[in-house]
Amino acid sequence: MAPVSAILLFLFSSLAWGDSILVMGDSLSAAYGMPSEKGWVSLLQQRLDNKGYSHQVINASVSGETTHGGVTRLTRQLQRVKPQLVMIELGANDGLRGTALTVLQRNLMTLVQQSQAAGARVILLEMKLPPNYGPSYSQQFQSIFGQVAQQQNATLVPFFMAPVVLRPELMQADGLHPNARAQPVLLDQLWPHLQALLNVQVRSE
């Protein structure tokens, strides 16, 4: 049997140098309230495998995460995973906490810029707030994601919760988190944007 250190080195090398997709998200990507294999990130890995892509999906999502928390963790994740693509699904908790919009924008810019500096393409998921946060704050909050994506030439995914958030049968009791039945719907919202980038990568190799 190989020494444990040799096995760990092999696993780390495979993770670091293989085609990989890093998901930096919050509870929406961390399979909150359900087994992890039911979440859209796990379903994404299954779809990639079924369609013959070699990419490994690394889920670094943490329930309750903010953009600030993502910034503090991103550098280590980029060094560890060396991803070809980073999916950023953060910002909802910033909005729910009433974080200053300038702080949200700065953090999102940092997340995108650091990922691109590490050689990764970036997909940024747009977030929206419930209407009770006021139209002015909510509209400015949502627009920041498009502004950051445009300025940094990142791929923007329009609010991927749109098909499920107003359907009680696809939401958990708290009204904020999608349930297991919603996860394939969320993946379908994301997939065309991701597949386009994967196909560009394949053509460029």
Image (cartoon, rainbow, N blue to C red):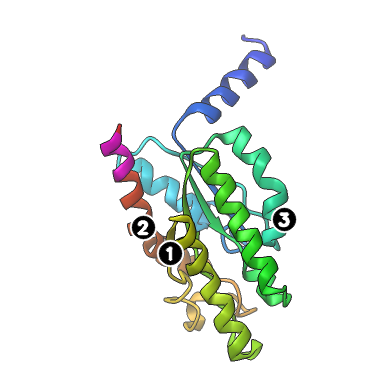
Residue at the image point whose x is 39% and y is 65% from the top:
189
- Per the picture, the main secondary structure of the magenta-coloured stretch is helix
Quarter in which the N terminus is drawn:
top right
User: What residue is shown with label 2?
Assistant: 193
User: What residue is shown with label 1?
Assistant: 157
Residue at the image point whose x is 57% and y is 80% from the top:
140
Which quadrant of the structure image shows residue 6? top right
Which quadrant of the structure image shows residue 53? top left
The location of residue 27, given as percent across then percent down, is 63, 62
| Circle 3: residue type | Gly
Q: Is the residue 40 above or below the residue 121 in the image?
A: below
| Circle 2: residue type | His
Query: Label for residue 69?
Result: 3
How many residues crowd mark 3 within 10 Å: few (<14), some (14–19), many (20+)? some
119 horizontally vs 102: left or right: left
Query: CB of mark 2 within 8 Å of CB of mark 1?
Result: yes
The location of residue 80, given as percent across then percent down, is 62, 33
The location of residue 149, given as percent across then percent down, is 47, 61
